[in-house]
Amino acid sequence: MKHIIAFSISAAAALSAVALDVNSTAGKLAEAVGSATDAPSLKVSGSVNAADLMFIHSEMGALTSLDLSGATIDEYDGEPLLNSVAYSPAGAIPPAAFLGMKLSSFAFPSNTASIGEGAFAATSLESVAVPAGVASIGNSAFADALRLASVTLPSTVSRLGTGTFRGCSSLASATLAAPLAEIPAATFCGCSSLRSLAIPASVRVIGEKAFANSGLTSVTLNDIDSIAPWAFLGCAELGVVTFSGNLPRAIGQGAFFRDANAEVGAAGLPGTLSEVAPHTFTGVKAVSGLGAAEASSIGEIGEYALAYTSVGESVYLPAELRKVGDSAFANWTGVRSIDATDLSDLPEIGDDIFGNLDKPNTTLYVAPDMLDTFKAAPQWKEFKIEAKTSGETGIDAPPTPETAEVTARFEGTLLRLTSTFEITAVELYDLSGLRLAFIPAVSSLDFTLDAAPFSSPAYIVRIHLGPTAVHLLKLAR
């Protein structure tokens, strides 16, 4: 008798361990599954609703594979479920549907239209291909899915919630598509394996901490309107950051804070900024393009905004500058000259804005009628101050990247550039700010670009000299 009982128990265990393939109608999945709730794999055809999905969540904790591709999700309107949902529309995967489950693979229902908040958070999913037809994905939908390595979103997804993939530390491949307009707050925060991401051309907004502590090694920000605070905070591997197309008008506080390897503005810092917010570039490796063209609209520079970073040997302070925060320029050890000739009044300044700068050996150029004012002003008076008219170089020879003579002229359809210092890269823009061409690794004193493919009557040319200097020229064809 004992042997028979043992055999019966073993047989029952074996049945519960096999894959289930059931047909169900909405609200009846529990009946279709019966006692086999310990099954590791489930395939469902027919229809299900939110109540069925919550049954899976609460009663089938051993599931590692769930295939709903042969089923549709029907509307649910009834008693509140475990996730407090009392109504869930057809096609909706409800909030927290599979939160914390062991699922390593999942096939979506054929009519999936939305994925609710936390629906797959903290699961064991390894890859996700969201099907066409899904329009929105809720907050933290896949957050903390530590084994998730790849994800693909279709062109039907127009809205992501905050923290969609937050904490997915194994995520190495992510594919996004237009018409997505925003990468919201914390979307890829903590995705330390994510080395690269092609941001769709439709994206205009990068949300707060969207890529904080991610593994990005480079990023191109094309036609971005705004970058929220701390968007790229702590990206230790982030290297070149390039702005192109229409440039952002706002970069939030701490956006690139302590990205120690980042070289921000490979094509120059956006000349559209009215403010450099506090801590925006603190501790990055280098910020390019702090010349007259790039900095002309800046009226305020926040505390530590450009501290502990390399900005080249020469820096321009724009006419619009009215306020500089505490330690904004701290540790500018490589700066040799500051052009303040366009300042007609002293800006309001915080404490020790030039901390650790060798001011007695750094030349501060000021307008002749401001010479006495600067010489009497705290912090400013410690510089080697010289008067000059705006636009003068103030330096004779030999040429440096900042002081080199650069010329541009058209010879038919050919644009010829010459410089007394080696040209390292060239960019061509039309007058709207659209980049038409980018030629890296030029390494020449004389360079020719064929502009025949372009029809603009006038152009803006960015000529890169050395590692950080950028000369800006405007010329008609």
Image (cartoon, helix red, strand yellow):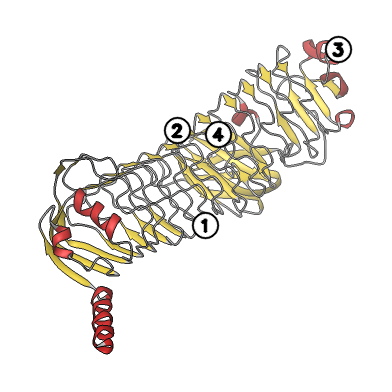
Task: Give the mark nearer the N terminus: 3 vs 1.
Answer: 1
Task: Give the mark nearer the N terminus: 4 vs 1.
Answer: 1
Across and down, in percent, residue 238 comes to 59, 51
Q: Residue at x 13, y 49 (%)?
A: 74
Circle 1 Cα neighbour tier, 10 Å, few/some/many (<14 / 14–19 / ≥20): some
Task: Give the mark nearer the N terminus: 1 vs 2.
Answer: 1
Horizontal side of 155 relative to 248 (left or right) equals: left
The residue that label 1 is drawn on is 195
Tell me the distance, in whole angstroms, between the alpha carbons under discs 3 and 2: 41 Å
- For mark 3, give the secondary structure: helix
Name the disc covering residue 225, or none.
Answer: 2
Q: Residue at x 84, y 21 (%)?
A: 386
Q: Nearer the viewer, residue 415 or 107?
A: 107
Tell me the distance, in whole angstroms, between the alpha carbons under discs 4 and 3: 33 Å
Horizontal side of 267 relative to 56 (left or right) equals: right
Q: Amino acid at mark 1?
A: Arg
Task: Give the mark nearer the N terminus: 3 vs 2.
Answer: 2
Horizontal side of 3 relative to 29 (left or right) equals: right
Q: State whether residue 275 is above or below residue 422.
A: above
